[in-house]
Amino acid sequence: MSRPIIIIKKKSGHGGHHGGAWKVAYADFVTAMMALFIVLWLLSSSSKQTQEAISGYFKDPSGTANKLGTSLAGTGESIPITKQDMAMLKEKLQKTIQKINDLDKLKKNIEVTVTAEGLRIELIESEKGTFFESGSAVLNQSGQELLSLLAAELGKVPNHISVEGHTDAKPFTGKSSYSNWELSSDRANAARRLMQQTDGLRLDQVTQVRGFADQRLRNLKEPFDSSNRRISIIVQYLSSNADEADSADKNKESESAKPSPERAKVETDASAKKQEQ
């Protein structure tokens, strides 16, 4: 009697069917998690402006040059301050000013406003002198402390800075060859020199130092008033804003140069009469 033939069939496992595709998916997952933790770490350990820059990038990865976090002009503390951001800079500077010793005595002499030219910071003198020695371009302790704090903050932005000096209408009674023109210019230059010291404004950041003497009075009704004696620091708008303003002015000029419909009609009628004659 012959033996029966026994056939043994082995069932293979699932590994051969799926292969190593799961490893690729797992690697992608780990990479994504690592990127997420890096972003969370940056957000938790960075300044507010850096956080806004990162947020701006993820909201608009393709980027536009005039939006926060999408420009290559700078990141973090070097984010350009546009016209829309001036209010934010104003608030930050006001918080910085709060650090000044004896602020109650100085708060009436410091004014920060957003103007057509940019953010204007004015250091207004009192009758006895608040930031400068009387009749001199020498900064006192209050002036040095305030300008140092302002310079530390303004040095973080890429915007250009202008410094102006102003006096009241009283003639300068010191040297015969020295007038309010020289005094206003010297005070503006003294402020610039201090603000460009270590950890202050960059050497290429100040583009204008101007002395106006008594030609731009703050109090027109009282030209001898002490409030006319002041230093003005202007954070200028970015060039793109200036270009837009120049373009708008040119458009207005071209429109004003065009004759009005009534005038054009009169000139046409006059020309027709000449031809008839």
Image (cartoon, rainbow, N blue to C red):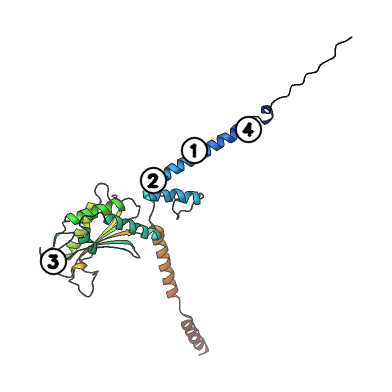
Q: Amino acid at mark 4?
A: Ala
Which residue is denoted by mark 2 in the rendering?
46
Closest to the observer, 186 or 101? 101
Nearer-N-terminus badge (2/1) = 1
Which residue is denoted by mark 4 in the rendering?
21
Nearer-N-terminus badge (3/1) = 1
Which residue is denoted by mark 1 in the rendering?
34
Q: Amino acid at mark 2?
A: Ser
Labelled pair 2, 4 in contact (Cβ < 8 Å):
no
Nearer-N-terminus badge (2/4) = 4
Position above or below: 7 against 59: above
Residue most extreme to the right: 1
Closest to the observer, 144 or 210? 144
Residue at mark 1 to residue at mark 4: CA–CA distance: 21 Å
Q: Amino acid at mark 1?
A: Met
Nearer-N-terminus badge (2/3) = 2
Labelled pair 4, 3 in contact (Cβ < 8 Å):
no
